[in-house]
Image (spheres, coloured by chain):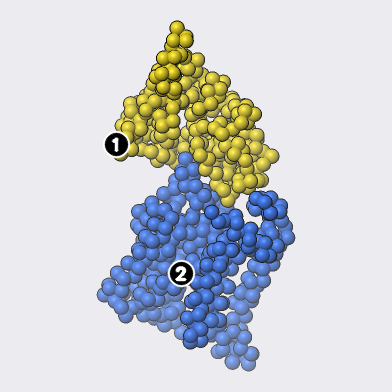
Amino acid sequence: MPGSPGGSFSTRPDAGGRRLRRVLLAVFAVAVLLVLIAPLSTTDQADSLGLPVLVDKSQIRILTTIAMFVVMATAWNLVGGLTGYGAFGNVAFFGLGAYACAVLVDPHKLHLPMLAGIALAPIVPIAFAVLVGLPLLRLRSHYFSIATLGTAVAVGEVVKNVEYLGGANGLFPPIVRRGDLLFLYLMVAVAAIAVGSVYLVLRSRFGYGLIAIRENEDAAAVLGVNTTLYKVAAFALAAGLTGLAGAVFAVWNSFINQELGFSLDFNIQMILMAVVGGAGTLFGPVLGAILLELLLQALAGQGTVAVYAQIGLGLLLAVTVIFVPRGLVDFFGGSSRLSLGYLRRTLRETSV
Amino acid sequence: MALLSLVHVDKRFGGVNALTDVGFQVEQDEILGLIGPNGAGKTTLLNCISGVFPLDGGSIHFAGQRISGLPPHRIARLGIGRTFQVVKPFLSMTVRENAAVGALFGASNLQPRLAFQAAEEVLELVGMAAKSGHAVGSLTIPDRKRLEVARALATKPRLLLLDEVMAGLNAVEVEEALDMVRTVHRSGVTIVLIEHVMKVVVGLCQRVVVLNFGQPLAAGTPEEVLRDERVIEAYLGEKYAARVRRAGG
């Protein structure tokens, strides 16, 4: 590769690694700090203690949403990033988890305690992932993407037309009073489980097998990787994690319907976050989820600005895929200085 | 008993008979050459042995066990490794990681820490130890072919199927590759290799099987086979064979 100093891209100089660590640490420090000070400074408690309101309810809601997207982007990364299968319907897992939880905790249906409902809900999306994964994961590239998108839309439509699931009205899990902080912590815990899972996967035989499948599925198979089992397992793990986020969302929001559970916005946002942050890396999807959700929140709810936010997101994806195809994590931590040179180089290396 | 035996193997693609009634055996510890003109079905045969293609007839047995019908990963697990004619490296990984994937799976089936150790040993064996930290993208073609062998070898196969590992190499590189194959063979691995470079076939193989239009044409020592008129005809056409016959006779 002419013009790329230092040779191979996989041996990163220390400076790049340190810069990446600094950026990530800063982002996490802010997130952790906000979560930690939250109990001291919600409107209610701050008032009663006479403290200034540092984090109000809407900000707690934003933090919870960020954690939710950290889960979804991280789970998507297992299939889209590590295994190289561009799943485009993971929101189905979210919706199924949410609906499953709503049914489990509903006083007129199964009436389980909330935490039991959340813990059991992922069984439904996991079973669904195994069932549809076996045929769908035989497809490759865009055929797989289209098939997963179609499946997600279909499941949403079916759910909407089932009387037991409330039809178009949806379901209303019991409201948990003063649950803001509880749900923030629950969602952060689920995010920690998701990131921890990917961390463990990356160090295991399973993780190497998934990356081998992404790089060359035929070679992986003759080396002894049970490609079908591995792909379905990755798909099911992603489904379980995404479903867990959906389950927490259902009780947090105390309302779930087809538009919320099978939202195509969520579907695209989680992919965008993973890709912008850095698909195939551990922290890329986390970084992407935090930055993009903050950006969305900053732009949302301001009338016509919301429309521009959508356009901006589309542009962001296009620019990222073209100039920073390995994601922001690579951009900040890559072997080169932050410069136009980096953008030019990756453009040359990754274009056909 | 033979390590590998093929019995009446048939493989069709639509109306094309890629392999018809192919049967031969590979003995423990030998190097068997598989030769034949382009399109004779050599690579198809390797794909059938390694489980990439299902058979349409016949059966394949390895170490006394029927392997035809098993998926590729099970066959790899039993101890058959292979390389691809067009190398298929894991591009985002380093040389060491590529070899380690082999050691993590196949008959080797090691835990990650041990797999990386095993990877270093295999890279040493094929002469790639100095490049173990390199990105695969920076490797030359001969090195990529070496890596392909190293990765297959890391699975700890009893039988290694090599698909044209010498193709596209210059004379010096072929000599190096010959040394590599001999080293691998000495380490106790039975080898079946597809090759067009006759120098390699003669220099390495104890026995050769010739395929033509998906059927076995001849078998024997390299010297016998290369003198066989049917083989010369298959490679060079009837006219040339006739000329050789006249000149020889």
Q: Position of residue A8 (x, y in %)?
A: 66, 50
Query: Dot 1: within a 10 Å radius of its alpha carbon, few (fewer than 14), some, or many (20 or more) residues?
Result: few
Using residue B69 as the reference point, say whether residue A245 is left or right of it: right
Give the mark toward the camera: 2 or 1.
Answer: 1
The residue positioned 58% from the left and 73% from the top of the image is A291
Query: Dot 2: within a 10 Å radius of its alpha carbon, few (fewer than 14), some, or many (20 or more) residues?
Result: some
Which residue type carries mark 2?
Ile
In this orientation, which residue lies closer to the viewer: A136 or A195?
Answer: A136
Q: CA distance from mark 2 to mark 1?
A: 45 Å
Query: Label 2 lies in what chain?
Result: A
Mark number displayed over residue B15: 1
Q: Position of residue A262 (x, y in %)?
A: 39, 71
The answer to whether the residue labelled 2 contacts the one labelled 1, judged by CB atoms less than 8 Å apart, is: no
Element at label 2: helix
Which residue type carries mark 1?
Gly
Element at label 1: loop
* Chain B palette colour: yellow
The residue positioned 61% from the left and 31% from the top of the image is B170
Q: Position of residue B239 (x, y in %)?
A: 41, 18
Using residue B31 as the reference point, say whether residue A236 is left or right of it: left
Mark number displayed over residue A268: 2
Using residue B1 as the reference point, say whether residue A39 is left or right of it: right
Q: Position of residue A218 (x, y in %)?
A: 46, 44
